[in-house]
């Protein structure tokens, strides 16, 4: 798959709430995931570990109030998307999250992801 095809499939799966299935289908075995400095899971390596991190995040959600995944923007073998979420977490209550994610694609799989966000 091309970067554009991966980006479009990623966006569609995330919009459908298929975040875990997205990792299974689109991520490279040696993927690296980066959160903002100082946040839990700041650097996570390996598909299974990224899957575990995603599952842990989802399991901590008690209610999704709203969410939006922006159209991916492609640049070479990278794509980015802006996301907005209004979520109530089991351990920290309700938060509005504004986020930008940047992904690198090689050989039709996501090999790197990095998240930048602001939470209220």
Image (cartoon, grey):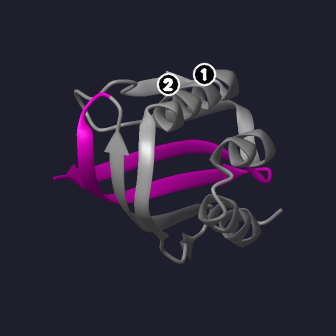
Say which of 19 and 33 sits in front: 19
Give the magenta part as a residue range: 91-120
Would residue 26 be counted in the magenta stretch? no
Q: In x, y percent, where is residue 118? A: 21, 53
**Residue at left offset 66%, top offset 53%:** 105
**Residue at left offset 77%, top offset 39%:** 24
Q: In x, y percent, where is residue 18? A: 69, 52
On screen, residue 30 versus residue 35, left or right, reads right
The residue carrying pointer 2 sits among few (fewer than 14), some (14 to 19) or many (20 or more) residues within 10 Å by Cα, namely some
Res 44 label: 2
Image quadrant of residue 14? bottom right
Say which of 1 and 99 sits in front: 99
The residue carrying pointer 1 sits among few (fewer than 14), some (14 to 19) or many (20 or more) residues within 10 Å by Cα, namely some
Give the overall secondary structure of the magenta segment: strand
Q: In x, y percent, where is residue 32? A: 55, 32
**Residue at left offset 39%, top offset 48%:** 115
Image quadrant of residue 99? bottom left
**Residue at left offset 34%, top offset 38%:** 89
On screen, residue 72 versus residue 96, left or right, reads right
Marks 2 and 1 in Cβ contact (< 8 Å): yes
> Which residue lies most toward the left here?
120
Res 49 label: 1
Mark 2 → mark 1, Cα distance in angstroms? 6 Å
> Which residue lies most toward the right here?
1
Mark 1 element type: helix
Q: Is residue 25 above or below residue 65?
A: above
Mark 2 element type: strand
* Mark 2 vs 1, N-terminal side: 2
Res 120 label: none
> Considering the image in quadrants, where does the N terminus appear?
bottom right
Image quadrant of residue 16? bottom right
């Amino acid at each position: 798959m091309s970067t554009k095809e991966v980006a479009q499939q990623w966006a569609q799966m995330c919009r459908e709430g298929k975040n875990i299935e997205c990792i299974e289908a689109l991520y490279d075995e040696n993927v690296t995931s980066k959160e903002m400095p100082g946040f839990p899971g700041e650097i996570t390596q390996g598909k299974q570990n990224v899957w575990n991190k995603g599952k842990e995040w989802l399991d901590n959600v008690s209610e999704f109030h709203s969410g939006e995944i922006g159209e991916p923007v492609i640049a070479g073998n990278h794509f980015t998307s802006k996301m907005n979420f209004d979520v109530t977490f089991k351990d920290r209550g309700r938060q509005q999250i504004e986020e930008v994610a940047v992904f690198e694609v090689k050989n039709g799989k996501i090999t790197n992801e990095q998240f930048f966000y602001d939470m209220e």
